[in-house]
Image (cartoon, grey):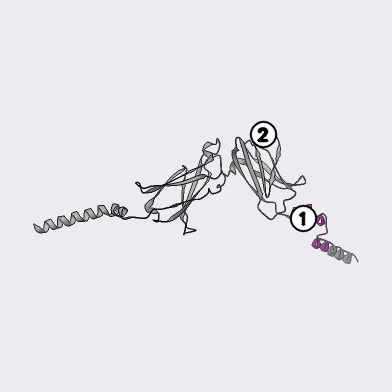
């Protein structure tokens, strides 16, 4: 009878587990919640509004039910122990002046004041710069080149001032054939001879922190700028082949004079 009782008890327990009738699972509360994956990612943007910094977090799984979930950050804060995030659609954000920018903080996902998962972050190591803007391309006919310029709000910032910019450009008909150039300035020269004549090009820029103290991720791409290269006309061909023709004529004349002698 003892073995039979154990077997029946085990079977009853398994049936409960499969049907989801044990504990709080019937109400879809904590037991189900603890089975979910609450992994998340965060990035910071410094001095987005005067002296205020912005911290944004989101779940790695976009399908997760985040209705009752909250985010909280503790540690490395001025005058307070912890701060709660605001929520906008699927993103959680916190705009404040209270980040120390020194040391680690702990960010936790909370469900009814219970920590579901936590991770340690350093605000200055997860910086995502603001996207560059005002991309322009000017053709210099005399120099036979294109001058690319763009702007970034980080030129006026106190903290994340030094960036690496990636300029990507392509001929529009070649969708995936991007040419890329990295630079620290906001000006780039493209030689006309390296571009196809009478072709439409697209160009865009993004940035990433470039310093020992601040680290992080690529910014969003700037809005694209489109420009067309000029046609190669007869004047340009004469400029290209003129010196060669002159040398050939001189050699021909010298050969002719030598034959007469």
Quarter holding the C terminus is: bottom left
Q: What's the magenta bit mostly, secondary-structure-wise?
A: helix
Q: State the CA–CA distance, disc 2 to disc 1.
A: 36 Å
The residue drawn where x is 13% and y is 58% is 256
Q: Which residue is mark 1?
A: 32
Q: Which residues are magenta?
A: 13-34
Spot occupied by residue 55 in the image (x, y as percentages of width and height): 64, 42
Q: Residue furthest right?
A: 1
- For this view, does 70 lie left or right of residue 124? right
Q: Which residue is mark 2?
A: 78
Q: Residue furthest top?
A: 79
Residue 75, numbered circle: none
Q: Secondary structure at mark 2?
A: loop
Quarter holding the N terminus is: bottom right
Residue 123 in which image quadrant: top right
Spot occupied by residue 154 in the image (x, y as percentages of width and height): 53, 39
Q: Nearer the viewer, residue 155 or 20?
A: 155
- For this view, does 48 lie left or right of residue 256? right
- Do the CB atoms of the residues marked 2 and 1 lie less than 8 Å apart? no
Q: Secondary structure at mark 1?
A: helix
205 is within the stretch colored magenta: no
31 is within the stretch colored magenta: yes
Spot occupied by residue 77 in the image (x, y as percentages of width and height): 67, 36
């Amino acid at each position: 009878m003892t073995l039979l009782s154990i077997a029946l008890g085990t079977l009853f327990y398994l049936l409960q587990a499969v049907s989801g009738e044990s504990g709080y699972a019937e109400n879809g509360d904590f037991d189900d919640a603890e089975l979910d994956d609450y992994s998340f990612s965060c990035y910071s943007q410094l001095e987005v509004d005067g002296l205020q910094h912005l911290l944004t977090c989101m779940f790695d799984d976009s399908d997760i039910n985040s209705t009752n979930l909250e985010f909280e950050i503790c540690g490395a804060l001025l005058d307070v122990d912890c701060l709660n995030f605001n929520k906008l659609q699927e993103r959680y954000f916190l705009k404040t002046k209270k980040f120390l920018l020194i040391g680690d903080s702990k960010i936790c996902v909370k469900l009814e004041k219970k920590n579901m998962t936590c991770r340690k972050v350093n605000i200055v190591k997860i910086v995502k710069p603001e996207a560059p803007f005002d991309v322009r391309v000017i053709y210099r006919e005399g120099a036979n080149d294109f001058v690319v310029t763009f702007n970034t709000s980080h030129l006026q910032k106190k903290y994340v001032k030094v960036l690496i910019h990636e300029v990507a450009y392509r001929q529009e008909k070649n969708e995936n054939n991007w040419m890329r150039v990295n630079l620290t300035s906001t000006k780039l020269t493209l030689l006309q001879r390296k571009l196809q004549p009478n072709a439409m090009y697209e160009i865009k820029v993004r940035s990433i922190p470039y310093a020992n103290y601040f680290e992080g991720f690529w910014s969003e791409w700037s809005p694209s700028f489109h420009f067309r290269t000029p046609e190669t006309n007869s004047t340009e061909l004469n400029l290209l082949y003129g010196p060669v023709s002159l040398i050939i004529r001189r050699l021909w004349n010298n050969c002719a004079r030598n034959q007469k002698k």
